[in-house]
Amino acid sequence: MNDLSKRRLKTWVRMLGVTRAAENRLRDYLRREHDTTLPRFDVMAALWRRRDGVTMSELSRMLLVSNGNATAVVDRLERDGLARREAEDGDRRRIRVRLTPEGLTAFEAMATGHEAEVDAIFASLGEADLDMMRDILARAGRSE
């Protein structure tokens, strides 16, 4: 392994550490302040972005999770009155899921606090830092 390769590996490990620490802090915040989980928040965020609803397959692809994982979260959201499944154009084989009005309200309350928590996590980064990180991550994502 050459020096650049080792530095890339160390950078990858550092990125994982930062990501895990941020996720853990967000998980703790959501549990403590909203009695919810990060996967549940992520599903609600996806449904909030697509107000017209999505199929379960679309939701799984959006979140990069299995259909089974998405279904389990949607089951709980539906049970709690925060989401609903509806047959698409009367075809019971094609189901769309969307947030209920109560789900929209609950998500928007959580999202405000979530954004503030993310802001606090990365408070040491200024505009130039964020611009540089965005550019670096965009280049790294294209290196496939």
Image (cartoon, helix red, strand yellow):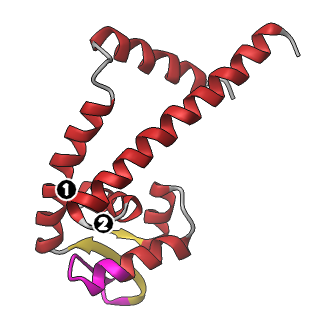
Q: Which residues are magenta?
A: 76-91
Q: Identify the mark nearer the N-term, 1 or 2.
A: 2
Left or right of 1, for residue 102: left
Mark 2 closeness class: few <14, some 14–19, many ≥20 residues within 10 Å: some
Occupied quadrant, residue 108: bottom left
Quarter of the image containing the N terminus? Answer: top right
Q: Give the camera-side residue of 69 and 144.
A: 69
Q: Secondary structure at mark 2?
A: loop
* Residue 91 on image: x %, y %: 38, 88
Q: Residue at x 50, y 23 (%)?
A: 138
Residue wearing tag 2: 36
* Residue 64 on image: x %, y %: 53, 56
Tell me: residue 16, above or below residue 124: below
* Residue 56 on image: x %, y %: 44, 72
In the image, what residue type sits under mark 1? Answer: Met
Give yes or no for contact between labels 1 and 2 (Cβ–Cβ under 8 Å). yes
Residue at the right extreme of this rendering: 1
Residue wearing tag 1: 110
Tell me: residue 61, above or below residue 82: above
In the image, what residue type sits under mark 2? Answer: Thr
Q: Is residue 79 magenta?
A: yes
Tell me: residue 44, above or below residue 11: below
